[in-house]
Amino acid sequence: MNLQEHIKEIQKAIRAGQFINEAAVSRGVVMRVLQVLNWPVFETNIVWPEYPLESLKVDYALCDPPNKPTVIIEVKNIGNLEGADSKLFEYAFRAGVPMAILTDGQEWHFYLPAGKGSISERRFYKLDILERELDETVNRFERYLAYENIRNGGAIKNAHADHDNDSKLREVERNIPIA
Protein backbone atom coordinates (compact mmCIF):
# COMPACT_ATOMS: atom_id res chain seq x y z
CA MET A 1 0.00 0.00 0.00
CA ASN A 2 1.39 3.41 -0.96
CA LEU A 3 1.16 6.71 0.95
CA GLN A 4 -1.86 7.86 -1.04
CA GLU A 5 -3.84 4.74 -0.05
CA HIS A 6 -2.83 5.14 3.60
CA ILE A 7 -3.93 8.79 3.57
CA LYS A 8 -7.33 7.77 2.15
CA GLU A 9 -7.77 5.24 4.96
CA ILE A 10 -6.69 7.79 7.58
CA GLN A 11 -9.15 10.34 6.16
CA LYS A 12 -11.95 7.79 6.34
CA ALA A 13 -11.08 6.91 9.94
CA ILE A 14 -10.92 10.60 10.97
CA ARG A 15 -14.34 11.25 9.42
CA ALA A 16 -15.70 8.18 11.27
CA GLY A 17 -14.33 9.49 14.59
CA GLN A 18 -12.07 6.49 15.16
CA PHE A 19 -9.20 8.39 16.76
CA ILE A 20 -10.65 8.95 20.21
CA ASN A 21 -7.53 10.06 22.08
CA GLU A 22 -3.93 11.14 21.67
CA ALA A 23 -2.59 7.57 21.77
CA ALA A 24 -4.94 6.57 18.94
CA VAL A 25 -3.79 9.56 16.84
CA SER A 26 -0.19 8.72 17.63
CA ARG A 27 -0.43 5.08 16.62
CA GLY A 28 -3.10 5.25 13.95
CA VAL A 29 -1.90 8.33 12.11
CA VAL A 30 1.59 9.51 13.05
CA MET A 31 3.34 6.13 13.26
CA ARG A 32 1.52 4.95 10.14
CA VAL A 33 2.63 7.99 8.13
CA LEU A 34 6.20 7.69 9.41
CA GLN A 35 6.37 4.02 8.52
CA VAL A 36 5.11 4.62 4.98
CA LEU A 37 7.69 7.42 4.64
CA ASN A 38 10.33 4.76 5.33
CA TRP A 39 11.17 5.70 8.91
CA PRO A 40 12.41 2.64 10.85
CA VAL A 41 9.63 3.05 13.43
CA PHE A 42 10.78 0.11 15.52
CA GLU A 43 14.31 1.49 15.95
CA THR A 44 13.68 3.60 19.02
CA ASN A 45 16.99 5.44 18.79
CA ILE A 46 15.81 6.80 15.40
CA VAL A 47 12.06 7.21 15.97
CA TRP A 48 12.27 7.92 19.68
CA PRO A 49 8.93 7.94 21.49
CA GLU A 50 8.56 10.18 24.55
CA TYR A 51 11.95 11.74 24.00
CA PRO A 52 13.19 13.24 27.30
CA LEU A 53 13.99 16.96 27.41
CA GLU A 54 15.13 17.64 30.96
CA SER A 55 11.90 17.27 32.98
CA LEU A 56 9.70 17.24 29.85
CA LYS A 57 8.94 14.69 27.15
CA VAL A 58 8.07 15.34 23.53
CA ASP A 59 5.95 12.68 21.84
CA TYR A 60 8.51 11.82 19.14
CA ALA A 61 12.03 12.77 18.23
CA LEU A 62 13.09 11.76 14.75
CA CYS A 63 16.81 11.22 15.00
CA ASP A 64 19.48 11.35 12.34
CA PRO A 65 22.06 10.23 13.25
CA PRO A 66 20.61 7.85 15.86
CA ASN A 67 20.04 9.45 19.29
CA LYS A 68 20.37 12.99 17.83
CA PRO A 69 16.98 14.64 17.18
CA THR A 70 16.49 16.47 13.91
CA VAL A 71 12.70 16.78 14.05
CA ILE A 72 10.32 16.68 16.99
CA ILE A 73 6.63 15.86 16.76
CA GLU A 74 4.04 16.77 19.36
CA VAL A 75 0.73 14.89 19.05
CA LYS A 76 -2.63 16.07 20.37
CA ASN A 77 -6.22 14.86 20.24
CA ILE A 78 -8.10 15.74 17.06
CA GLY A 79 -9.31 19.32 17.29
CA ASN A 80 -7.13 20.06 20.30
CA LEU A 81 -4.23 22.09 18.87
CA GLU A 82 -5.21 25.46 20.34
CA GLY A 83 -2.28 26.90 22.27
CA ALA A 84 -0.11 23.77 21.91
CA ASP A 85 2.39 25.53 19.66
CA SER A 86 4.01 27.42 22.55
CA LYS A 87 4.72 24.11 24.32
CA LEU A 88 6.10 22.73 21.05
CA PHE A 89 8.50 25.67 20.86
CA GLU A 90 9.65 25.05 24.41
CA TYR A 91 10.43 21.46 23.40
CA ALA A 92 12.14 22.62 20.20
CA PHE A 93 14.31 25.08 22.11
CA ARG A 94 15.39 22.40 24.57
CA ALA A 95 16.03 19.85 21.82
CA GLY A 96 17.78 22.32 19.49
CA VAL A 97 16.09 20.89 16.39
CA PRO A 98 15.76 22.58 13.00
CA MET A 99 12.16 21.40 12.46
CA ALA A 100 9.18 20.89 14.74
CA ILE A 101 5.75 19.48 13.95
CA LEU A 102 2.49 19.82 15.82
CA THR A 103 -0.33 17.51 14.79
CA ASP A 104 -3.70 16.20 15.83
CA GLY A 105 -3.64 13.70 12.98
CA GLN A 106 -5.86 15.82 10.76
CA GLU A 107 -3.90 19.07 10.88
CA TRP A 108 -0.11 19.10 10.60
CA HIS A 109 1.71 22.33 11.43
CA PHE A 110 5.34 22.41 10.25
CA TYR A 111 7.68 24.93 11.92
CA LEU A 112 11.23 26.20 11.71
CA PRO A 113 11.74 27.01 15.41
CA ALA A 114 14.92 29.05 14.92
CA GLY A 115 13.30 31.31 12.32
CA LYS A 116 12.50 34.99 12.75
CA GLY A 117 9.17 36.35 13.88
CA SER A 118 6.23 35.12 15.88
CA ILE A 119 5.36 31.46 16.26
CA SER A 120 2.81 31.74 13.46
CA GLU A 121 5.44 33.34 11.20
CA ARG A 122 7.78 30.42 11.85
CA ARG A 123 5.18 27.96 10.58
CA PHE A 124 6.15 27.27 7.01
CA TYR A 125 3.25 24.98 6.16
CA LYS A 126 -0.14 23.96 7.51
CA LEU A 127 -1.55 20.74 6.13
CA ASP A 128 -5.14 19.68 6.78
CA ILE A 129 -5.40 16.20 5.32
CA LEU A 130 -9.19 16.43 5.04
CA GLU A 131 -9.12 19.72 3.13
CA ARG A 132 -6.05 19.49 0.88
CA GLU A 133 -6.00 17.57 -2.36
CA LEU A 134 -4.62 14.06 -1.93
CA ASP A 135 -1.65 14.71 -4.25
CA GLU A 136 -0.75 17.85 -2.31
CA THR A 137 -0.93 15.96 1.00
CA VAL A 138 1.34 13.20 -0.30
CA ASN A 139 3.75 15.74 -1.79
CA ARG A 140 4.08 17.69 1.46
CA PHE A 141 4.61 14.62 3.61
CA GLU A 142 7.31 13.41 1.24
CA ARG A 143 8.84 16.88 0.91
CA TYR A 144 9.14 17.55 4.65
CA LEU A 145 9.03 14.21 6.41
CA ALA A 146 10.33 11.37 4.23
CA TYR A 147 13.17 9.59 5.99
CA GLU A 148 15.58 9.98 3.09
CA ASN A 149 14.79 13.71 2.75
CA ILE A 150 15.55 14.24 6.43
CA ARG A 151 18.75 12.20 6.18
CA ASN A 152 20.11 14.03 3.13
CA GLY A 153 19.10 17.49 4.35
CA GLY A 154 16.57 18.02 1.56
CA ALA A 155 13.61 18.35 3.92
CA ILE A 156 15.20 21.20 5.87
CA LYS A 157 16.22 22.94 2.62
CA ASN A 158 12.66 22.56 1.33
CA ALA A 159 11.30 23.94 4.60
CA HIS A 160 13.57 26.99 4.46
CA ALA A 161 12.72 27.65 0.80
CA ASP A 162 8.98 27.43 1.49
CA HIS A 163 9.32 29.58 4.62
CA ASP A 164 11.27 32.22 2.70
CA ASN A 165 8.58 32.31 0.00
CA ASP A 166 5.87 32.75 2.66
CA SER A 167 7.88 35.52 4.35
CA LYS A 168 8.18 37.38 1.06
CA LEU A 169 4.44 37.06 0.45
CA ARG A 170 3.68 38.40 3.95
CA GLU A 171 6.02 41.34 3.35
CA VAL A 172 4.33 42.15 0.04
CA GLU A 173 0.90 41.97 1.70
CA ARG A 174 2.06 44.34 4.44
CA ASN A 175 3.48 46.82 1.95
CA ILE A 176 0.67 46.88 -0.64
CA PRO A 177 -1.49 49.30 1.43
CA ILE A 178 1.54 51.59 1.79
CA ALA A 179 2.07 51.73 -1.97
Image (tube, helix red, strand yellow):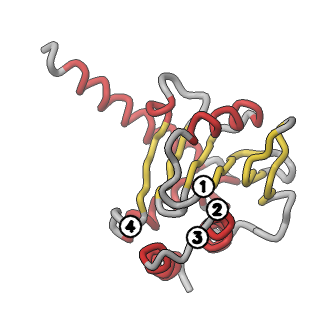
Crowd around label 1: few <14 · some 14–19 · many ≥20 (10 Å): many
The percent position of residue 1, horizontal first and vertical second, equals 56, 86
In three-dimensional space, the C-alpha distance between marks 4 and 1, rounded to whole angstroms, equals 17 Å
Callout in the foreground (3, 1): 3
Q: Which is nearer the eye, 15 or 5?
A: 15
Q: Earlier in the sequence, mark 3 or mark 1?
A: 3
User: In this rendering, would 15 be left or right of 68?
Assistant: left
Q: Secondary structure at mark 2?
A: helix
Q: Amino acid at mark 2?
A: Glu
Give me the disc on residue 76: 1
Residue indicated by mark 2 = 22
User: In this rendering, would 88 be left or right of 125?
Assistant: right
Q: Residue furthest bottom?
A: 1
Q: Earlier in the sequence, mark 1 or mark 2?
A: 2
Q: Secondary structure at mark 3?
A: loop
Q: Earlier in the sequence, mark 3 or mark 4?
A: 3
In three-dimensional space, the C-alpha distance between marks 1 and 2, rounded to whole angstroms, equals 5 Å
Tag 2–tag 4 contact (CB < 8 Å): no
Crowd around label 4: few <14 · some 14–19 · many ≥20 (10 Å): some
Residue indicated by mark 4 = 130
Q: Secondary structure at mark 4?
A: loop
In three-dimensional space, the C-alpha distance between marks 3 and 2, rounded to whole angstroms, equals 7 Å
Which residue appears at 51% of the width and 23% of the height? 116
The percent position of residue 39, horizontal first and vertical second, equals 71, 66
Crowd around label 3: few <14 · some 14–19 · many ≥20 (10 Å): few
Residue indicated by mark 3 = 20
